[in-house]
Amino acid sequence: MAAICRYSSFFISNPPLHHFNKSNSFNQLSIAISNRHRTFANSASPSPSSSSSMEAPPDGYRRNVGICLINSSKKVFSASRLDIPDSWQMPQGGVDEGEDPRAAAVRELREETGVTSAEILMEAPHWLTYDFPPQVREKLNRQWGSDWKGQAQKWFLFKFTGKDEEINLLGDGSEKAEFGEWSWMSPEQVIDRAVDFKKPVYKEVISVFSSHLQ
């Protein structure tokens, strides 16, 4: 019987955990960004030049992308950070200068999880922001040599089309590993296990992508 743990106001079963695996090989299949499946909430599908990806994020926030990766059972990928104990999150990462957020999302998914077998189903229509707590802001801005208030995120919903064996927390080997364990979770579990300052954004992300999570 699965262990039952209490989180906030409801009970959920602990999902199976997959630990850091150095032996997994990397799948070289390309990610298919399918126009047939891509949708934009509250608007008709725009041309690339008018995509909401091109909207400017709020001033004072670092440009970032978030990836909500779901499997065929509509469970969401979440992983525990190596540097922050008991901190679970969906993949995310900064957008390089001049980089399109959609391309950044594909890159970050590959770098952090090794996943290349996936397709984009949907893009959140607006940038979503969260502020760093004071200690986190001081640490990150010292690390980045900047003074960001927080992060402005463009979120993308990906459907995983590969097998679990493809997932490798070493990523594609181009960046230092960030995660120690991963699991497929319900949307409620993903929100509940996120750090407090990210929970409002996670709730909004799950709401925006809800039609694909039911």
Image (cartoon, rainbow, N blue to C red):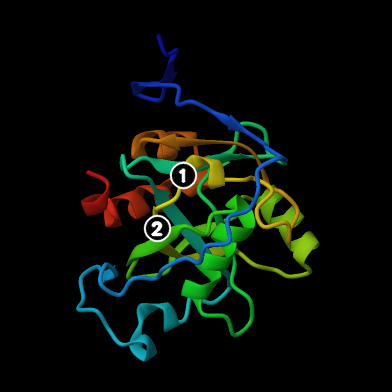
Counting residues from the N terminus, which is met first, the one under dot 2 or under dot 1?
A: 2
Front disc: 2 or 1: 1
Report the residue at 46% width, 81% height from top: 56
Query: Camera-side residue: 214 or 116?
Result: 116
In the current view of this chain or complex, which residue is farthest to the top? 1
Residue 8 shows in this picture: yes
Residue 58 shows in this picture: no
Q: Which residue is mark 2?
A: 158
Labels 2 and 1 touching (C-beta < 8 A): no
Give coordinates of residue 55: x percent, y percent. 42, 82
Give coordinates of residue 15: x percent, y percent. 45, 26
Report the residue at 45% width, 50% height from top: 162
In the current view of this chain or complex, which residue is farthest to the bottom? 49
The three-letter amino acid code for the residue at tag 2 is: Phe
Residue 104 higher or lower than 16, as above or below: below
Corner quadrant of residue 64: bottom right
Report the residue at 36% width, 40% height from top: 75
- How packed mark 1 is, by other alpha carbons closer than 10 Å (few <14, some 14-19, many 20 or more), is few
Query: Camera-side residue: 54 or 178?
Result: 178
In the structure shown, which secondary structural element does the residue marked by tag 2 occupy? Answer: strand
